[in-house]
Amino acid sequence: MPESGSTAVPPPRADAGFVMSGVSVAFGGLVALSEVSLEVAPHQVLGVIGPNGAGKTTLFNVACGFVRPDTGTLYWRGRELRGLRPHRLAALGISRTLQGLGLFDRMTVLDNVMVGAHRHARAGFWSALLALPRGGREERELRARALAVLGELGVADLAGRVPTGLPYPVRKRVALARALVADPDLLLLDEPASGLSAEEITELGGTIRRLAGRMSVMLVEHHMDLVMSVCDHIVVLDFGRLIARGSPDEVRDHPAVLAAYLGEDVPHDTAEPTGGSRC
Ligand SMILES: Nc1ncnc2c1ncn2[C@@H]1O[C@H](COP(=O)(O)OP(=O)(O)OP(=O)(O)O)[C@@H](O)[C@H]1O
């Protein structure tokens, strides 16, 4: 059911997914997040939406360990995540994609993806990163897995190319492949639809739903049609507060959500061939 307000939740069960409880962040005097609590349940796609400046990116950065909350607790599978740092995510079975894709321009697409696999193969990570001589079964398995993920996303034929010069939507797929090759249990996606055409967004929606069969997904996204079509559950932020949560249908018609969005212009991005509504 939709509900307003946000209160800390008790420590979750061991079979829970990713939980943020009572998270607050202030930048100087500006409160970016205020007592926000949410859960990404196993195999659930959780959408995080809200008008510009609502706190979505800050929330994402807390989940990734880029921003340390002033108050609040993160849990993963019932265990508290203390002092989460981005480099610890992979070992925890958590992967993320960022708006700035962070691909290495001088490495091939395949090597970029292999770098993401260090949860499984630390040696592979370093050899890929440092371009050291390769060999061995582990390296071959890693390469095969990277190619398989690239294939799943329809870009295996570009494995030998470098990202520079590839179209942005293709580079986004490579960045997603890099997040997936570690076989995460939780995938954090920051605006995956930005810069994609309507057709590509539809395809992305299918990919996200397919991924939910084997992992949980937290989707921070502006693109309303995508959020409404792929999310099992949605939380809505406004001025750093969680103002509503529920199914897509519940959230769509929630008065507080309507008020939050009607309070600002809805930008229609004419520079990009995006389909549907943005917010
Ligand atoms: N590093 C920072 N220093 C100071 N203020 C910040 C910082 N990061 C975010 N803010 C402020 O915190 C608030 C929340 O910002 P945030 O980027 O999390 O919102 P958002 O929902 O992602 O917005 P948008 O949809 O426009 O990207 C905003 O008022 C923003 O200006």
Image (cartoon, rainbow, N blue to C red):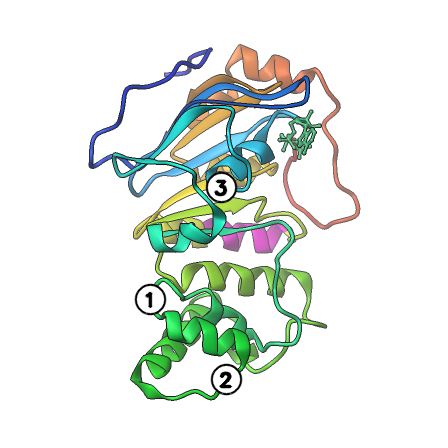
**Element type at marker 1?**
loop
Picture quadrant of ligand 1: top right
Residue at the spot 20% in from the left edge and 37% down from the top edge: 15
Q: In front: 180, or 115?
A: 115
Label located before the other in sequence (2 or 1): 1
Mark nearest the camera among 2 and 1 is 2
Check disc 1 and give the amino acid type. Answer: His
Look at the magenta stretch and give its main secondary structure.
helix
Q: Residues within 10 Å of mark 2 (few under 14, many from 20)?
A: few
Give the image quarter of residue 54.
Answer: top right
Which is nearer the N-term, disc 1 or disc 3? 3
Q: Which residues are magenta?
A: 198-206
User: At 25% from the left edge and 34% from the top edge, which residue is drawn?
Assistant: 78
Query: Helix or strand or loop: what does disc 3 sit on?
Result: loop
Q: Position of residue 83 (x, y in %)?
A: 43, 38
The residue positioned 42% from the left and 12% from the top of the image is 3
Q: Which mark is residue 65?
A: 3
Indicate yes or no whether the magenta region holds residue 77.
Answer: no
